[in-house]
Image (cartoon, grey):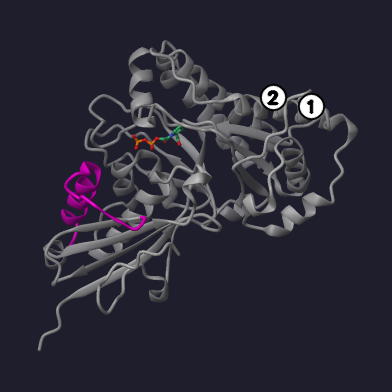
Amino acid sequence: MATSPRYHVTVAAPINIAFIKYWGKREGGEHLILPTNDSFSITLSTEPFRSKTTAVLDASLTEDELWLNGEKESVAGNPRLVHVLAAVRSTCPADRAKLKVRVVSNNNFPTAAGMASSASGYCALACALVKVFQSTADVSVLARVGSGSACRSVYGGFVKWLQGTNADGTDCIAEQFANAAHWPEMTVLCAVVKGHKKDVSSTKGMQLSLQTSPMMPARIRDVVPARMAAVSEAVRNRDFASFAAITMSDSDDLQAVCRTTTPTIVYATDDSFQIIKLVHAFNEAKGRKVLAYTFDAGANAFLFTLRPDVPEVVALVNHYFPTPDELCAFNDPSLLRASKAVTLAPNCTALLGDYPKRPLTYLLQSPVGDGPREMSDAESLINLSTLAPILTVS
Ligand code: 2P0
């Protein structure tokens, strides 16, 4: 009896945090997700948080299927997924293109963690589909048509997403600028604040900004190209002070672009603004740039700092936003322990005046990560004998 062809793969993919932001799709680029400017990000580790996807191609399957976080989703009802699948099938051997695929995907971060899952999720999907279909497509192009920022999670280290000029998006790719080992001291903390609810999606927000914010033309034409050049130098030279200044300027500009959008968009909350104030006051108290913030289309603060400063920075964050250990998800728990032994200098204990101390929902710590990784069959989200989805989050 001939065995039916069956191919499978499981991939874990990381979150990435942009320090030069993507905010706007160029004309005709809504469908292919072609941005108005380059962007630049740091890929986090897949520990503690990652998206995981298993894809199985099998002759017995009669339709394409997607199971996301334990629920079966409509493939036809998700135009971006349909588009990714079409792009994979047009770039793979004919004997694989005709097979149906079962995809099971989950995120190990709780919804309360407030981390956007589209970047890691579509990255894991693109990596898994390219591998299982033996597609010749650029993985970052496939991830991009799922969700723009997902293309930057395809590589580890410091990653640029190049806007490109081709109408078909073939030169709109991500590329690694420097690997994780280039600047191993670089550390990311994600401070997930309370009461964060986003009422304008990124997709909608950037569309409105492009149409109405008077800041957008100069941002696209001059501001971002100049910052991309300057921050490339800062990363190349491991110059944290310059990196921090440029990163905070670009974050501030994104907030200003949103504020000058009609109708106005404000993603930040009081806690976000207090964290901005805290970062500036702490840097001033220390007499050097120890810490940089960046914000996306949301209230959560992403903080960059260097590893030797992490214990003091964590002590600082926990002084103002006291967060129980069980809500601190650290890639390296020794850094959390070391923070307990830090006594903040007297000039750092009253930086926010009488602002009430409020716990964070989550505090995440990650070094720069290596990018997506293939996982063993033991970690598959599909039972490889019966093809049944394994729906527990693991
Ligand atoms: C970024 N953001 O560069 C920017 C900064 C939010 C602010 O990429 O429409 O979810 O799927 O391409 O990728 C969020 O936008 O939007 C984003 P789509 P996406 O990280």
Q: Which amino acid does label 1 sit on?
A: Leu
Q: Nearer the viewer, residue 306 or 99?
A: 99
Q: Name the residue: 31% across, 46% down.
A: 141
Looking at the image, tell me whether mark 1 or mark 2 is earlier in sequence order. Answer: 2
Label 2, on which residue? 277
Measure the alpha-carbon separation of dots 1 and 2.
8 Å
Magenta stretch: give its range: 69-92
Q: Which of 366 and 357 is in front in this view?
A: 357
**Mark 2 and mark 1 in contact (Cβ < 8 Å)?**
yes
* Residue that protrudes farthest toward the top in the picture: 214
Split into quadrants, the picture shows ligand 1 in the one at top left
Label 1, on which residue? 351
Instruction: Locate the C terminus and report the quarter of the image it occupies.
Output: bottom left
Q: What is the number of the mark on residue 338?
A: none
Q: SS of the residue at dot 1?
A: loop
* 280 to the left or right of 73: right
Q: Name the residue: 50% across, 42% down.
A: 114
* Residue 31 in view, yes or no: yes
**Up-down relation of residue 129 to residue 187 (above or below):** below
* 332 to the left or right of 108: right
Q: What residue type is labelled 2?
A: Lys
Where is residue 232? Give x, y as percent.
55, 36
* Residue 134 in view, yes or no: no
Residue 183 magenta-highlighted: no
Where is residue 314? Give x, y as percent.
73, 44
Q: Is ligand 1 less than 8 Å from the beta carbon at label 1?
A: no
